[in-house]
Image: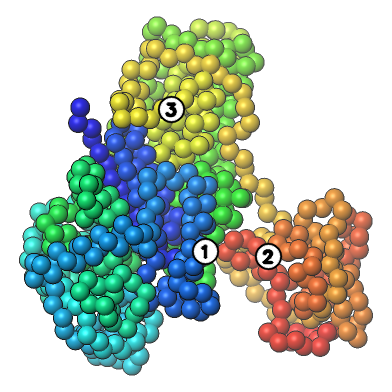
Amino acid sequence: MHKKTCYTTTPIYYVTAKPHLGSLYSTVIADVITRWHQLKGYDTYMLTGTDEHGQKVFQAATAAGKDPKSFVDSFIESYHDTWQKYEIAYTHFIRTTDASHIAAVQEWIRQLQAKGDIYKALYEGWYCTPCETFVTETEINEQRAAGHDQPHCPTCGRPVQAMQEETYFFRLSAYQDRLLAYYAEHPDFIIPRERAHEVIQFVKSGLKDLSISRKTVTWGIPFPGDEHQVTYVWADALNNYITAIGWGQKGKEAEFKHWWPANVQVMGKDIIRFHAIYWPAFLMAIDQPLPKHLLVHGWIKVDKQKMSKSLGNVVDPIVLYNEYGADAVRYYLMRHMAVTHDGEFAIADLEQAITSELANDLGNLLNRTISLAEKHDALKLDDPRLWSPAALELIEQAWQTIESVSEYMDDLMIHMAVARLWKFINQVNAYFHAHEPWKLAKDNRKQFIEVLAVTCHSLYVIGVIAWPIMPYKMQELLAALGCKLQVDTEHDRLADIALSYHQRTFILTKGAPLFVKPEPKEASVEEPKVEPTYIAIDDVAKVELLVGTIAHAETVPKSDKLLMLQVDFGPLGVRQVLAGIRQSYEPAELHGQQALFVGNLKPRMMLGHESQGMLLVAKDVNGKAIIMRPLVAVPNGSRLA
Ligand code: ME8
């Protein structure tokens, strides 16, 4: 039997550091889409990996004093580890330094050479290393006309370097009309559609041929037929989507045919031009069909700025994993970052979502149902033969939910699908409350059982539909109902739900709460208020801010929050200060560090120790308390003015 296939990809990430929340975001999106198709019985393939060549990686390796290969090797484990922790069920992890990829890219170039799509000429223009992109003279001239003296990259805004070298060009201009015709005939090629406009405008303004080799760069795939050139990193990287599944490799033709064209290629809006213009043209040049959809998502921002390695405001997914668990973070990213827009990441919002949506709306519903069943000896629940009209109404709402969620998922509007599912969760909660099963337990056993049974069916539907978002937690939910979700290519598990309403027995088991509400944060590390409260200058003068050196730091017995510091304030003497930074620093790290303190805070007792001041800290993006200190050493006891 011919199986339906689904091939999904993520961008391959530059390996200059460990993965961050932005890389995780794209990867979770691709994983959710893949799992959604698995639920429907598709044969799936998910590809992710790393982009390891080029000037940017070479420069980072040189700065780190390493050769490029051992430099990139040093990060691979952290990718595998992060993806495994976040339950990313990828089929293959490609590295562009893999021998099979290198050989296939060279084969691609040879085919283009044979076709006459490549010629050698002088490239004169500008180059942005962080984006690995050629910036044309026209773009720089536009900047000059707009009054900018410093030539900069139109994408990232950073300064560009002048470049002049002999390179090989790909005849991109020859594909302009075919590309425009393709966009017109396939309005859902680029999702969301709004993003297609900027692409179409760019192509219409006239495509120049694209340089696809570099002479002054050495860290790259050797260019066939010219030992002085390496392949331009984007020509190398984009091809990963086909080389990973066997293109250009003998004996792998059937594998390639099985998966290509990709169903969904996920990427951030920063790299749309590469994927929506160069990539389709590269494929047209070798007579291959184009991917069905490019899903272009927005940026995760922190404090209104794009989160990026170079800005130093990246959030570490492992810190979030340790604090909140993978599924809560996956849920938050999928629901609260609209896939079509930029989204602001804030710990407070994540915690709010866990508390109110995951723990209260969903976790409590499961917990209350099972507790009630346990109390009234109903842990084994058979379906009633006939459902009452009220139960049928909830069942009808479940059908509608499956239908609407499917539509949103098929349109790749994941945040809408999750929001729609939560509407149903609220409907189930409303039904449960309205029927007061705790009263029915005493007065009407038959109805009591029905309320529990239809609630369990609803939870089952929720567990199945939300599995792509929260694979681990939803298996836990289903296990508490005595069920297990098994995805395979023989079954459409969504369609199966329809059959289950008259043939399922639930065997309930009481377990630990599904989601743990995050602890409210200590007062000392509270989020700053948005609205400033102004104070008079006299009030400022009242506060004595001092510089002191931490002469000694130690833990405080029975406290996992406090450290006890002995602080040298020079002529003002040594004072003892207790600070809530145990989670952020090891005592030894603090020895000899200067820091800022409030010197005239009324002394107070904390866990039996006197604190004679207050240490000043600020939180970094991961919630770690960071001590504040002078840029250069100043005398102890100096007062801030
Ligand atoms: O561009 N918000 O690699 P890269 C959301 N190697 N997504 C973000 C993000 C943010 N703040 N920051 C990064 C490259 N991303 C090339 C790709 S593909 C053939 C080659 C995600 O490591 C987003 O998907 O700079 C973005 O497109 C990608 O990481 C860029 O990763």
Q: Residues within 10 Å of mark 3 (few under 14, many from 20)?
A: some
Q: Where 563 sits versus 504, above or below?
A: below
In the image, the residue with mark 1 has its CB under 8 Å from the nearest atom of ligand 1: no
Assess whether mark 1 and mark 2 are in contact (beta carbons under 8 angstroms).
no
Q: Quadrant of the C terminus?
A: bottom right
Q: Quadrant of residue 547?
A: bottom right
Q: Which residue is mark 2?
A: 625
Q: Quadrant of residue 531?
A: bottom right
Q: Quadrant of residue 258?
A: top left
Left or right of 577 on screen, residue 394: left
Q: Residues within 10 Å of mark 1 (few under 14, many from 20)?
A: some
Q: Where 563 sits versus 630, above or below?
A: above
Between disc 2 and disc 1, the foreground one is: 1
Q: Residue, x 53% and y 16% (percent of image)?
A: 507
Query: Residue 326's x, y, as percent?
Result: 53, 46
Q: Residue, x 39% and y 33% (percent of image)?
A: 465
Q: Nearer the viewer, residue 521 or 493?
A: 493
Q: Which residue is mark 3?
A: 485
Q: CA distance from mark 3 to mark 2?
A: 42 Å
Q: Earlier in the sequence, mark 3 or mark 2?
A: 3
Q: Which residue is mark 1?
A: 74
Q: Secondary structure at mark 1?
A: helix
Left or right of 519 on screen, residue 14: left
Q: Amino acid at mark 3?
A: Leu
